[in-house]
Amino acid sequence: MKSFLKKKGIEPSFQNYAIKALSYMASGLFASLIIGVIFKTLGDEVPNIPAFFSTIGDFTIQPIVYGGAVGVAIAHGLRAPSLVLYSALFAGAYGAMEGGPAGSFIAALVAIELGKLVSGETKIDIVVTPFFTILVGYLMGSFVGPYISSALIGFGEIIVWATDLQPFLMGAIIAALMGLALTAPISSVAIAIMLDLEGLAAGAATIGCVSQMVGFAVGSFRENGFGGLVSQGLGTSMLQIGNIVRKPILLLPPTVTGLILGPVATVWLQLENNAYGAGMGTSGLVGPIMTLDTMGYQTETFVMMLVFYLFIPAILSLVMFEWMRKKGYISPGDLKLDIS
């Protein structure tokens, strides 16, 4: 049985389903839902922007669109055969229609893995494989996805409620955990969207993600220069995961920064965001754009973001990184990236 599954490219594991599939789901969401929100925000809020920006945004954020993108992205990540990949568009789209992003993920993942089982097994593969994959996607989207989606959203509501009740403690916890999820090969944006984080909880998550990205960007400037500054500060701190595996202590400065600034964001700043920006940090400036979309285009918001999304995380992390270098906890080259 194991040899048959391996031949079919089916390898059930935490790595494949909780890390790889979620990461590709995030790519699908970014290429559809998140970009759509950016288009819509620009079209609705920025003067003299063509009206079609809002039109693009309104269309792209529809579940049938982003769900299809999620299905295809997961199929691509799991190296599904072509007919399974194309059929995954329906599975993801229908799952999203019935259960939102979480429903899309479940429907697509199960349909893809079961679709692989029948792929290439008959002489009428062009009919059997898409028929079976689409059928499984429909069944999962109808009967399983909505319940999982409701459970995850319910859990997200508990997190939001707990943050409103205990903003100091929850602000620190959420900032630290979401920041670690962003740097680890786990999709923080997929988690935030599936949990439907909003309000103060989303604000704390944003601070945690920003702390990781900005922290590693400035902390590794000695080794990586301007290229590393941009690739980590506007790209992702996940680039450091190889170095972190070799020396986990590298996580301390940006994580401690998130622990410090998370309560500041929730208690004193009352920083809010939405689910789309909560797990993105400064990646592509999505976190700041979604903050503006949530809190409004006001001078105070711009100043607050400049201070707490850039200057303070950079200063705190840099001070800690430099102290650890002086103490010998971090050696020259520990933070070096291969970004050539």
Image: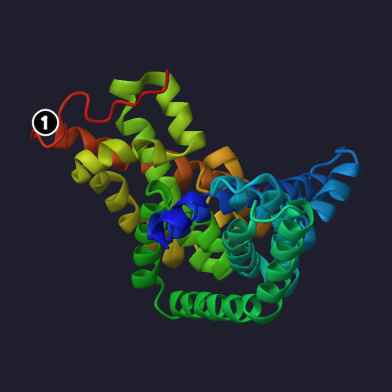
Amino acid at the residue labelled 1: Lys
Q: Is residue 51 left or right of residue 295?
A: right
Q: Is residue 289 left or right of residue 131?
A: left
Q: Which residue is mark 1?
A: 326
Q: Is residue 48 left or right of residue 130?
A: right
Q: Is residue 197 visible?
A: no
Binning the other alpha carbons within 10 Å of mark 1 as few (below 14), some (14 to 19) or many (20 upward) gives: few
Who's the residue at 44% across and 81% down the image? 165
Say which element carries label 1: helix
Q: Position of residue 127 (x, y in %)?
A: 79, 57
Q: Quadrant of the N terminus?
A: bottom left
Q: Position of residue 315 (x, y in %)?
A: 33, 38
Indicate the quadrant where residue 245 lies: top left
Q: Quadrant of the C terminus?
A: top left
Front residue of 37 and 101: 101
Q: Position of residue 186 (x, y in %)?
A: 43, 53
Is 125 situated above or below 284?
A: below
Of all residues, the one furthest to the right in this rendering is: 51
Front residue of 135 and 267: 135
Q: Position of residue 251 (x, y in %)?
A: 26, 46
Is 247 situated above or below 340?
A: below
Of all residues, the one furthest to the front in this rendering is: 123
Front residue of 124 and 39: 124
Is 99 situated above or below 65?
A: below
Who's the residue at 41% across and 23% down the image? 339
Is 170 situated above or below 283?
A: below
Who's the residue at 44% across and 60% down the image? 18
Q: Is residue 176 visible?
A: yes
Indicate the quadrant where residue 39 lies: top right
